Image (cartoon, rainbow, N blue to C red):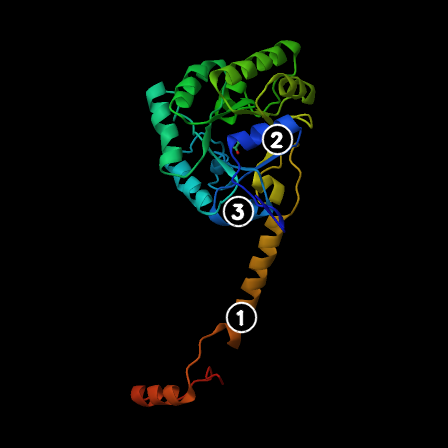
Amino acid sequence: MQTSAGPERQKTTVHTLAAKKKRGEPITMLTAYDYPTALALDQAGIDSILVGDSLGMVVLGYETTLSVTMEDMLHHCKAVARGTRFAHLIGDMPFMSYQVSKTEAVRNAGRFLQEAGMNAVKLEGGRDIAGTIEAIVAAGIPVMGHLGLTPQSLHKLGGWKVQGTSAAAARRLVEEAHILENAGCYAVILEAIPDRVAEIISRRLRVPVIGIGAGEACDGQVLVTNDLLGSFDRFTPRFARKYADMRAVMEQAFRAFIGDVSSRRFPAPEHAYHMSDEEYDALLRDLRMKPSKWRMAI
Ligand code: KIV
């Protein structure tokens, strides 16, 4: 629908993302874990918000994503859904919520849509989980794949290492990307792989390929919002661009508050609620008290 202010914004769906790939328009995606961040992302015009299990590290302070539970994810997904009107919402399935059995995977995937307001789920892995992806898609739930440096397999991968750097490993990634597409994924995330390999995969897949540390040729880009804002203290991955230094901004504001309270510059009269002199005097009389030095003029 067209208005004088331009085309009216519609909810982004899996079809919107597919159409963007067809038109060659980059897809934008960032993570969120709470209501205010989701609100700001949605109002800024982001295509898609991922409630990533990176939550475990950047918000909950764990060393890895392995400790994140279904309950953690659902709690944060609900907050993000309350702040979002237009962006396509993806809930990240946490470690052990889809690996044990297909039945459990489908039931857990369903909870993201039924209880937490998500539009799709994301799973890490390729060939090994293709059957699980098929089962979730068969239940009517859109699935986004995730290949390359998949943090839930950190111990198997031997650390935070770039993946697919040899011809053989890159070939396996290309094959796994095709497997995910054939299993029914509507999009695939590629994390920390060489840009040339990501380009080949983006050209070969019909579905959108979203990169994080995978170069410029992907159909879209995603970052962990805390890396972009500079609010995660431990490290900033090489592939992230820091658009702000929120940790410094926060610390500066907190120091200013501590200073103002310590030196009684806060609160000022405009931050307080007042009572008329008449009522105050009556109260003091009732309580048999003298006016204090804090008596304020209205
Ligand atoms: O958990 C997450 O935020 C992710 C992104 C890094 C893609 O999986």
Q: Which residue is mark 3?
A: 37
Q: Quadrant of residue 230?
A: top right
The numbered mark at residue 229 is none
**Residue 179 drawn at (x, y percent):** 52, 14
How far, Cα to Cα, is label 1 from label 3?
A: 28 Å
Decide which of 239, 264 is in the foreground and name it.
239
Marks 2 and 3: in contact by CB < 8 Å?
A: no
Q: Please, is residue 76 above or below residue 294 in the view? A: above
For discs 1 and 3, the disc positioned in front in the rendered view:
3
**Residue 269 drawn at (x, y percent):** 51, 77
**Residue 58 drawn at (x, y percent):** 52, 40
Tell me the residue at 46%/81% (across/down): 294
Assign a secondary structure to mark 3.
helix
Q: Please, is residue 211 above or below residue 85 in the view? A: above
For discs 2 and 1, the disc positioned in front in the rendered view:
2
Q: Residues within 10 Å of mark 1 (few under 14, many from 20)?
A: some
Q: Is residue 212 visible?
A: no
How far, Cα to Cα, is label 2 from label 1?
A: 51 Å
Of the two numbered discs 1 and 3 on the same chain, state the one appearing first in sequence: 3
Residue kind at label 2, given as amino acid type = Lys
The numbered mark at residue 20 is 2
Residue kind at label 3, given as amino acid type = Thr
Residue 117 as seen in the image, left or right of residue 169: left
How far, Cα to Cα, is label 3 from label 2?
A: 24 Å
Tell me the residue at 62%/27% (across/down): 21
Q: Which residue is mark 1?
A: 266
Assign a secondary structure to mark 2.
helix
Of the two numbered discs 2 and 1 on the same chain, state the one appearing first in sequence: 2
Q: Residues within 10 Å of mark 2 (few under 14, many from 20)?
A: some
Residue kind at label 1, given as amino acid type = Phe
